[in-house]
């Protein structure tokens, strides 16, 4: 729970992937950021290839996907 300047914020409710456990020494791979201008299917293929060793960890895959997007494509 975070407090200050108004109503308290429950940070757990803001989590994109609740219950995510990062593997020890995990580092998010560098991704070419998707800007919404190219083919989204190609972006998904490239993302899946970079994350292939974690493909069975659905929560980690979802968590890291946001790092492959630019701000414009997150909206």
Image: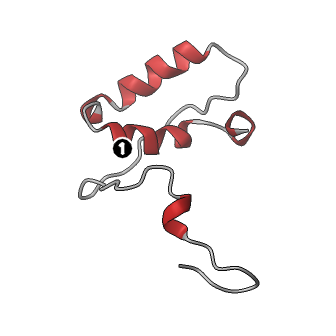
Residue 71, percent from left and from top: 71, 42
Residue lying at 49% horizontally and 37% vertically, measured from the top left: 65
37 sits left or right of 24 in the view: right
Q: Residue at coordinates 53% horizontally, 61% vertically from top-left?
A: 13
On the picture, is 72 further left or further right than 54? right
- Horizontal and vertical percent position of residue 75: 73, 38
Count every numbered label the image shows and give the total. 1
* 33 sits left or right of 21 in the view: right
How many residues crowd around disc 1 within 10 Å: few (fewer than 14), some, or many (20 or more)? some
Q: Residue at x 60, y 33 (%)?
A: 33
- Rendered location of residue 54, percent (x, y): 28, 36
| Residue at image mark 1 | 60
Is 68 placed above or below 41 here?
below
Which coloring applies here? secondary structure
Residue 74 percent location from the top left of the image:
67, 38
Up the image or down, 49 lies above or below 58; here it is: above
Going 37% across and 23% down the picture, which residue do you hit? 49
Q: Is residue 64 left or right of residue 14?
A: left
The outermost residue toward the front is 7
Q: Quadrant of residue 67?
A: top right
SS state under label 1: helix
Farthest residue to the bottom: give it: 4
Query: Image quarter for residue 66?
Result: top right
């Amino acid at each position: 729970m975070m407090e200050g300047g108004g109503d308290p914020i429950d940070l757990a409710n803001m989590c994109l992937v609740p219950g995510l456990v990062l593997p020890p020494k995990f580092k998010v791979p560098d991704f070419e950021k998707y800007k919404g201008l190219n083919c989204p299917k190609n972006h998904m293929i490239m993302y899946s290839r970079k994350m292939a060793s974690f493909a069975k960890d659905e929560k980690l895959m979802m968590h890291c996907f946001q790092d492959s997007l630019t701000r414009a494509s997150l909206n």
